[in-house]
Amino acid sequence: MTTENRAHGLSCRLEALARTITRFAGSAMGFGLALGTIVVWGVTGPLFHFSDTWQLVINTGTTIVTFLMVFLIQRSQNKDSLALQLKLNEIVAALDGASNRLVNIEDLTEAELDVLHRHYARLATMAKGDVDLRQSHSVDEATTRHEMKHGLRNNGRTSKGALAGSAPFNATNG
């Protein structure tokens, strides 16, 4: 067995273990076990005269569990986030008129996301003035429709009355 195969096998086993523990920790049984542990610890306090060792046991146990749960929660969040992004990418890619620039948007920098946010905020502002909510599909289309609807286009140029900063998003002006 090669090192790569062993690493893959270990990765699969760790993933299965993490999935099992995540399910258990989020279940009523998991909560019951945690609650039972605390109750037993509290009840045994008088037996151990509330000693430093008695306190150290619960402190050490909860610290270890918390440390491991942080990684399990992060793993679960990463996986859920990726699955959600893939589903959204599929929807964006499949919808007619949707802006394909949103596929893999999670890979953009914060500055690029801010630029897109400003454009979609502008789209929302324009949409508030529209009676038919189904009218706009993308920032570019919304800008064009808004300008045409209000007679702001003159031979391919936007008149002075156009929405400030209404140029479509691209890498050069983004």
Image: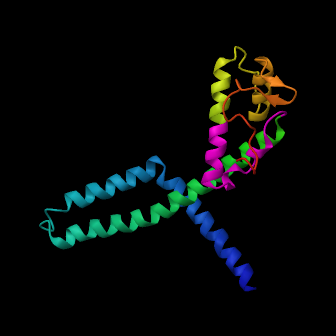
Query: Is residue 107 found inside the magenta-colored segment of the image?
Result: yes
By secondary structure, the bulk of the magenta-drawn segment is best described as: helix
Quarter assignment of residue 68:
bottom left
Q: Nearer the viewer, residue 144 or 17?
A: 144
Residue 86 picture location, percent across and down: 73, 49
Quarter of the N terminus within the rendering: bottom right
Q: Name the residue furthest top.
A: 131
Where is residue 84 shown, x and y percent of the image?
67, 46
Q: Is residue 12 above or below residue 122?
A: below
Which of 10/28 is in front? 10
Q: Position of residue 16 (x, y in %)?
A: 62, 64
Image position of 82 with respect to 46: above or below: above
Span of residues in magenta: 96-119
Instruction: Report the front residue among 137 and 17.
Output: 137
- Magenta span contains residue 86: no
Provide residue 172's location: percent of width, then percent of height.
75, 50
Looking at the picture, does residue 28 appear above or below residue 139? below
Which residue lies most toward the bottom here? 2
Q: Quadrant of residue 155?
A: top right
Residue that lies at the very extreme toward the front in this rendered image: 160
In the foreground, 32 or 64: 64
Q: Is residue 128 left or right of residue 62?
A: right
Residue at image coords 65%, 45%? 115
**Name of the residue lying farthest toward the right:** 155
